[in-house]
Image: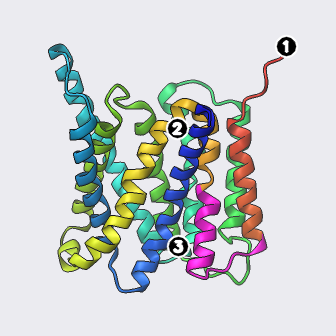
Amino acid sequence: MNNHLKGVLYVGVGAASYGILATFVKFANNNGSGTAGLAFAQYFVGVVVLSLLSFLFSKKNVAPTDKKQIRKNKLKLVAFGNFLGLTSSFYYLSIQYIPVSVGIILLMQTIWMGVVLEFFIKRHLVTQKKIIGAIAVIIGTLLAAKIFEVDAALNFKGLAFGLLAAICYTGTLYATSSIALELPLFTRSKYLILGGLMVTMLFWNFQIINEFDWWVYLKWGAFLGFFGTILPPILFNKGIPVIGTGLGSIISALEIPISVMSAYFILQEEISSLQWLGILIILISVVYINLKPKAKK
């Protein structure tokens, strides 16, 4: 198997891992587990395992002149890790009020939010291609979120939490692609997840204590930690440098159908034809935005 195909598989499995999270959080909720305890357990397990991996496999030989800058970059990762923790908390809150199949669509508004962020940070004009793609994503979202379905009961609290999750996810993606790239894989992931754990503890505070249950931590914490905070960042960091950001973004969009299908089979959520049309429009938009034209000979 060549390296390019391996890169595609790494990113695809990482996207699938993210895609199943919300379904199993809601499944755990339906079986009596509180959201605060689940979120805390996910990040706690992630920090413990990534700290161990970082200790075992990350190189320690750093030049003295680099230590100050590296310390600063680690603090940046922790700060941006707050966005990751808030993404999970807002996302898990949103699916308490709306179906998982709608929640994932709201989360993926990061597609057009990323275009806006790029404009303000890099200070260059957004291409016509990205503007068209972003508008198409919004149209697809209106369909996939059941805006045009008369019998759909929209919960605006759930929609608001979903959009807040998307805003925070945009900050997370910026950090993972731009901050402290010189640090080893496990070290970068460890500090991002540590920031996520810290903000999760602040966000849920005493509710974590109220929902404290060792069985939840052992059962769901290990599962959510593995598929939410350990496996995806490792796979993305291994795959995206090989296949490139454009193709990586396209394959990462697999998170949408994976999430919708898992909600359909595990939670028995109904998916309408309009929703599938909206999802298809979003996926095509992601391909359109990121696919580079072949160079003319």
**Number of marks in the rendered image:** 3
Report the disc number at residue 216.
none
Is residue 115 shown to the viewer in this render? no
- Tell me the tag on residue 156: 3
The CA distance from mark 3 to mark 2 is 37 Å
Question: From the image, which quarter does the C terminus lie in?
Answer: top right
Q: Nearer the viewer, residue 154 or 288?
A: 288
Which disc is residue 297 wearing?
1
Give the residue at x 55% y 71%: 100
Label 3 or label 2, whichever lies nearer to me, is 2
Where 152 sits versus 6, above or below?
A: below
Q: Is residue 278 left or right of residue 202?
A: right
Q: Nearer the viewer, mark 1 or mark 3?
A: 1
Say whether residue 13 is magenta.
no
Q: Which quadrant of the view contains residue 242?
A: top right
**Which residue matches tag 2?**
239
User: Where is residue 222 drawn, in percent x and y?
Assistant: 32, 65
Q: Residue at x 42, y 51 (%)?
A: 231
